[in-house]
Image (spheres, coloured by chain):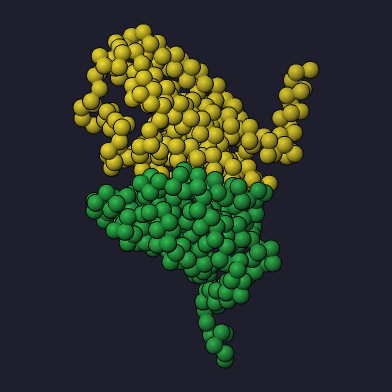
């Protein structure tokens, strides 16, 4: 029974008006959750966590750097799954959602690269090194930009989304390369210190702000994805009846 | 029945492409001339010091090969789209992937093979040490097919877009990064007296991956551009 209801809800969610209502209702909660967790994480990171014995206070920027990097990669995986669904079942909403992932992911990649450079200048003595981790992250940025450019270059948005979805799949090769780059090559970038299983190489007192910031970036991604997809739908369907009804209702309520 | 009628469509396409390429020999050799203009500009730009040039040689030859491969990409599928031949690819019952492979093979023979043949000359111009020459040629033999295939994917993706040529080069760049890294890595290792087989193996793996998956992607992208 519940399974049937869930299935029905899932199918209805694929229709633009239903998604509009759903996204409009859910997104504010995600934004609020993001604000609270991000502020709490920043409070922990700036005031509670002790300075690192080697790096001093400058390591605090990594509480932004690491979650942004993770979310940039996780966002790409979300985009890949959506692109696969879009290519196989041709669901219009997943096409739009996949394309909405790209600008958010590009922004997070940029944040990751920028914070990494700012941290690297005092710690490594240079803004940038051409090692595997940094280069593959830069490639990720260019893949995101390529997807956005390809999508924008088509006047027919559905065609653009489906063609760009192929590029999403081709670019997915880069994700494992980024992840394993610190193990396959000797890089200046340190290997992973956080492990899901077993002992982390990081002191437990330094972990809570990181976890909270990771939750915050997940919520940020979800909120931005819902809002972007909803706006894209409204823009593409601006001459459709359901948008017209929305506008009419909106103006009627205001007067 | 004539000889041509019995050939498979993919084979017929390949013959036609090669015949066209040989009829327009001057046009077909332009990428090669372009390669050498790039190679000649490097010593003029960075100075003629043999040590510096020898260090840069593998990377520069690869970058020049990449640039010259880009030149022909814009017209890889576009004339066929414009005169309607591309639609015929999908109407018949024959494999589109086969035709895509035939087209990519002729692209590689026109842009990739001349680069391989003339790479020893380019290597001499940049003072690449002689013992690294074999690895350079080998890396080009293994890597340039992937260069053609990934370029073909980018060309198919941007087929009916505005400003395709700029977009095309932006799309190709992230796709071919591993290629350039492994290929130039292998040559540099030999130049430093180390064993390049790990890099060459990864390069071969990358090419095989491109050879298996890129034709499917190209065929799918072409079909979408016809919808």
- Where does the C terminus of chain A fall, quadrant-wise? top right
- Which residue appears at 76% of the width and 28% of the height? A248
| Viewport quadrant of the N terminus of chain A | top left
Residue A183 at x, y percent in the picture: 27, 39
For image coordinates 73% across by 32% down, the residue present is A245
Q: In the rendering, at what x and y percent does residue A132 appear?
A: 35, 39
Q: In this view of the protein, can residue A165 be seen by the observer?
A: no
What chain is the yellow one? A
**In the rendered picture of this protein, how many numbered marks are placed on residues?**
0
Pick the front one: A236 or B48: B48
Residue at position x 36%, y 14% from top?
A45
* Res. A111 in view: yes
Q: Is residue B80 above or below residue B62?
A: below
Corner quadrant of residue A150: top right
Instruction: Please state the horizontal and vertical placement of residue A209, each as a whole percent of the image.
Output: 35, 17
Frontmost residue, B155 versus A68: B155
When asked about the image quadrant of residue A123, the answer is top left
Chain shown green: that is B
Query: Measured from the top left, where is residue A24 in percent x and y?
Result: 59, 27
Q: Is residue B37 placed above or below A38 in the rendered structure?
A: below
Q: Residue at 60% across / 68% down in the picture? A: B26
Residue that lies at the very extreme toward the top in this rendered image? A47
Of all residues, the one furthest to the right in this rendering is A255
């Amino acid at each position: 029974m519940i399974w049937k209801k869930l299935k029905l809800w899932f199918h209805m969610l694929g229709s633009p008006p239903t998604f509009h209502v759903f996204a409009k209702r859910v997104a504010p909660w995600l934004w609020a959750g993001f604000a609270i967790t991000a502020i709490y994480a920043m409070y922990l990171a700036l005031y509670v966590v002790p300075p690192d014995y080697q790096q001093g206070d400058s390591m605090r920027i990594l509480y932004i750097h690491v979650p942004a990097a993770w979310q940039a990669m996780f966002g790409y995986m979300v985009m890949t799954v959506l692109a696969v669904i879009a290519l196989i079942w041709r669901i219009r909403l997943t096409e739009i959602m996949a394309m909405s992932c790209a600008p958010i992911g590009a922004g997070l990649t940029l944040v990751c690269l920028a914070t990494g450079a700012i941290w690297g200048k005092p710690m490594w003595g240079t803004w940038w090194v051409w090692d595997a981790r940094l280069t593959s992250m830069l490639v990720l940025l260019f893949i995101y930009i390529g997807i956005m450019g390809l999508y924008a270059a088509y006047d027919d948005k559905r065609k653009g989304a489906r063609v760009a979805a192929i590029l999403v799949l081709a670019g997915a090769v880069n994700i494992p390369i980024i992840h394993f780059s610190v193990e396959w090559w000797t890089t200046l970038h340190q290997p992973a210190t956080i492990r899901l299983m077993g002992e982390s190489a990081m002191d437990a007192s330094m972990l809570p702000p990181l976890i909270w910031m990771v939750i915050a970036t997940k919520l940020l991604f979800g909120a931005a994805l819902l809002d972007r997809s909803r706006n894209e739908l409204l823009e593409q369907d601006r001459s459709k009846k359901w948008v017209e009804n929305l506008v009419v209702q909106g103006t009627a309520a205001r007067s | 029945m004539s000889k041509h009628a019995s050939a498979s469509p993919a084979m017929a396409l390949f013959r036609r492409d090669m015949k066209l390429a040989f009829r327009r020999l001057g046009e077909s050799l332009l990428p090669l001339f372009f390669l050498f203009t790039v190679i000649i500009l490097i010593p003029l730009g960075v100075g003629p010091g043999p040590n510096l040039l020898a260090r840069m040689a593998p990377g520069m030859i690869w970058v020049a090969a990449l640039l010259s491969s880009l030149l022909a990409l814009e017209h890889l599928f576009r004339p066929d789209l414009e005169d309607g031949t591309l639609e015929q690819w999908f109407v018949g019952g024959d494999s589109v992937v086969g035709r895509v492979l035939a087209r990519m093979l002729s692209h590689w023979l026109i842009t990739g093979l001349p680069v391989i043949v003339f790479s020893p000359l380019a290597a001499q111009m940049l003072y690449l040490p002689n013992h690294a020459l074999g690895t350079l040629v080998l890396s080009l033999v293994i890597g340039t097919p992937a260069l053609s295939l990934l370029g073909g994917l980018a060309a198919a993706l941007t087929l009916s877009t505005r400003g395709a040529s700029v977009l095309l080069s932006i799309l190709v760049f992230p796709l071919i990064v591993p290629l350039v890294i492994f290929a130039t890595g292998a040559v540099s290792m030999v130049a430093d007296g180390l064993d390049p087989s790990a890099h060459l193996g990864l390069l071969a793996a990358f090419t095989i991956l491109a050879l298996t998956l890129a034709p499917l992607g190209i065929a799918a992208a072409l079909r979408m551009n016809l919808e």
